Image (cartoon, rainbow, N blue to C red):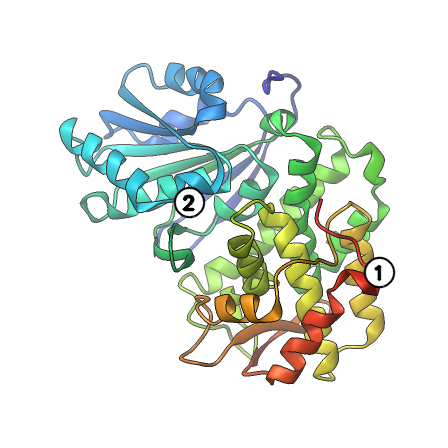
Amino acid sequence: MTDPTAGTTAETTLHVGGASPYDVVVGSDLARHLPAMVGSAAERVALVVDTRLQPFADDLVDTLADREVLVFAVPEGEECKSVEVAAEIWNALGDEGFTRSDAIVTLGGGATTDLGGFVAATWLRGVRVVHVPTTLLAMVDAAVGGKTAVNTEAGKNLVGAFHEPAGVLCDLSYLRTLAGEELVSGLAEVIKCGFVADPEILRLAESLEPGSLSVDDPVLRELVERAIRVKVEVVVDDLRETGGRDGHPGREVLNYGHTLGHAVERVSGYTIRHGEAVALGCVYVAELARLEGRIGPELVQRHRDVFGRFGLPTAMSGPTFEDLHELMRVDKKARGSQLRFVVLDDVARPAVLAGPSEEHLRAAYDALQLEDGGQAPA
């Protein structure tokens, strides 16, 4: 595994306002900020770490040398996001006398962040948590905004809580630990932010040469910071996803592409990466918006082009419409029996489409099938 501490960059601090304000620091070699974010009151710190990243936990433990640090290595990926894994940590925290003034730190990707945040939200009805995301996906999505969750047999992220972190350290040097396909998967969430809020993200993504994508590329860093800013602005205005203003979907906008995306992940047994599923979901809702007369075919094609140029899937085969439709019906965004989708009226003009016809849902699904010339999941 490559040493993630190689290389340095200047730091950027993005402030998240609201009732529980905190900072998101972007840069490299950021461990020194951890003690202040954890807080002086914490005598014990639980470090929830992806088992693959245990070799890198020592740096964080060393920065917390004046505290008792309990290290919990959890399974990689979605496998860790279960009530059973959460219960193991709860029981250990109880055995160690973990109090309300103590803190939790997460080190890992989006799944580890979701799990650790959920444990922090539920232990003693809420303890301090600091996220150290190690994937692009986690930096621009899971670590910011206070959504926490575990999965159940019924679906993804159906059991969770809102619990904002005390701080987030987006150490870009950790991106060196990622395989190329994992870095690309995270780009899907960045590109999503471009479609719903920041057209400059799309322009930058379209200017990148996919074959030379590098962690050291300043354009990649700008993409990361822009995507985080999009999320910060939305979250500050609508933390608990109760709705935006002036027709804007509010925080729900961040779910662009996720209704179908989560269904694709679930039906695949989570063998498809989250970003790949989101790319498919974004193309799907673009097709749906076209069928509803909200956008033209050229914007649908732009979805296919910008996701496809990085090797993200824009077409699929395998799951039937019935399989996916049933899973979408239990999506968190559904209201009663009515499906809801975030769609576009144009780039950076998102809206909610409630209760589309099954005819259009099926036609958008048909447009995703491989015979239409799209790119299949890797």
For the C terminus, the image quarter is: top right
What's the amino acid at mark 1?
A: Gly
Q: Is residue 165 above or below residue 99?
A: below
Q: Splitting the image into 4 quarters, where does residue 178 fall?
A: top right
What's the amino acid at mark 2?
A: Asp
Residue 145 falls left or right of residue 282: left
**Secondary structure type for disc 1:** loop
Q: Which label is found at residue 88?
A: none
Instruction: Give x and y (percent) for residue 4.
Output: 59, 20
Residue 29 falls left or right of residue 40: right
- Label 1: which residue? 373
In front of the other: 313 or 116: 313
Residue 124 falls left or right of residue 106: left
Residue at image point 75% right, 34% down: 218
Pointer 1 local density, CA inside 10 Å: few below 14, some 14–19, many at least 20: few
Instruction: Give x and y (percent) for residue 10.
Output: 64, 28
Q: Is residue 338 above or below residue 186?
A: below
For the N terminus, the image quarter is: top right
Residue at image point 32% right, 14% down: 65
Residue 344 falls left or right of residue 90: right
Q: How far, Cα to Cα, is label 2 from label 1? A: 35 Å
Instruction: Give x and y (percent) for residue 246.
Output: 55, 79
Instruction: Give x and y (percent) for residue 9.
Output: 66, 26
Question: Pointers 2 and 1 in contact (CB under 8 A)?
Answer: no
- Mark 2 and mark 1 lie on one chain; the one further toward the N terminus is 2
In front of the other: 291 or 208: 291
Q: Is residue 66 visible?
A: yes
Q: Which label is found at residue 114?
A: 2
Q: Is residue 259 above or below residue 31?
A: below
Residue at image point 29% right, 27% down: 45
